[in-house]
Amino acid sequence: MGWFDFIRSPSGRSVETLEIPLFPLNTVLFPGGVQPLKIFEQRYLDMAAACMKDETPFGICLIDSGSEVGSAAKPHPVGTLARIGDWEMEQLGILQITALGGRRFRIIDSEVGPGNLLRGHVELLSEGDTEPLPQERERLLPLLQRIVADLGSARIPEPHRYDDAAWVGYRITEILPIQNLAKQKLLELDDPLARLEILEKFLDQRKLLG
């Protein structure tokens, strides 16, 4: 079945699973997000080349312990699939890519392979049906719309789904100047309405909403 498979969970539901290379970073990628990356370690150069050749994703996870370079870091268990969009190598041995955020996943198990590349067996997390943005949360939109206009479509690509609760929550979270661990906790939330409630309270406390 290619690079994905299906297993049966204890509850009886089908769970999509993947075998993917993992890229632990000191950043959090959200579904629908864009992350520019500069790759220079051989393990990740090889990973990127394979992903582009085979048109397969890799996983970006926030580092729990360790560092981005050297020995394989321990990642937080929930991350986001990434596909390579634009890329260029203006300098030999340094690859610039744009990682495009896909679905969230949870690591089931992982192992360090050749070259210290971490590989994971992951299950894709369900995003459920699209939740419309509740009317009472529309006061979040003017701030988000101003930021989107400032950053442009290269940083926050279209379509801009201001009526989608999950999209609005992900976009606000990724641009907030908060600690990565807080962003990770918001990524892990399955309920987009709960995420919006937390964000609104945070922004209200700082008097950033009208």
Image: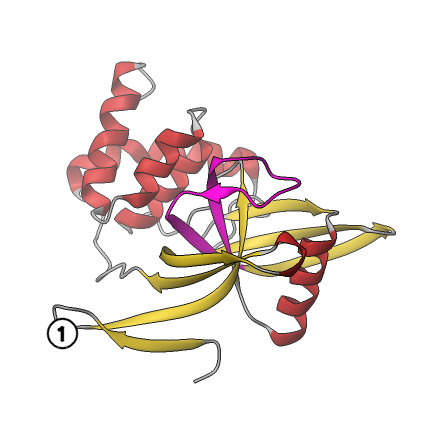
Q: Which residues are magenta?
A: 59-82
Can you give x and y, in whole percent of width and height, for residue 5 in the image? 37, 78
Q: Is residue 103 visible?
A: no
**Image point (16%, 36%), residue name:** 136
Place of residue 176 in the rendered image (x, y in percent of width and height, measured from the top left) = 42, 28
Going by the numbered disc 1, the residue's amino acid type is Gly
Residue placed at 68% from the left, 55% from the top?
Answer: 43
Residue 141 lies left or right of residue 94; in this view the side is left
Q: Residue furthest bottom?
A: 1
Q: Relative to residue 16, is residue 119 depicted above or below?
A: above
**Residue 180 among those drawn in magenta:** no
Classify mark 1: helix, strand or loop. Answer: loop
**Residue at far left of view:** 11
Residue tagged 1: 12
Foreground residue among 108 and 137: 108
- Residue 160 spot, x, y in % from top left: 42, 50
Residue 114 showing in the rendered view: yes
**Furthest residue to the top?**
206
Give left or right: position of 21 versus 164: right
- Other residues around mark 1 within 10 Å, as few (<14) / some (14–19) / many (≥20): few
Q: Is residue 60 left or right of residue 15?
A: right
Viewer-proximal residue, 125 or 41?
A: 41
Q: Residue at x 67, y 52 (%)?
A: 97
In the rendered image, residue 60 lying in the magenta stretch gets the answer yes
Image point 51% across, 37% down: which residue? 27
Image quadrant of residue 181? top left
* Figure quadrant of the N terminus: bottom left
Residue 9 point in image, percent of width and height? 20, 69
Image height of 102 relative to 152, above or below: below
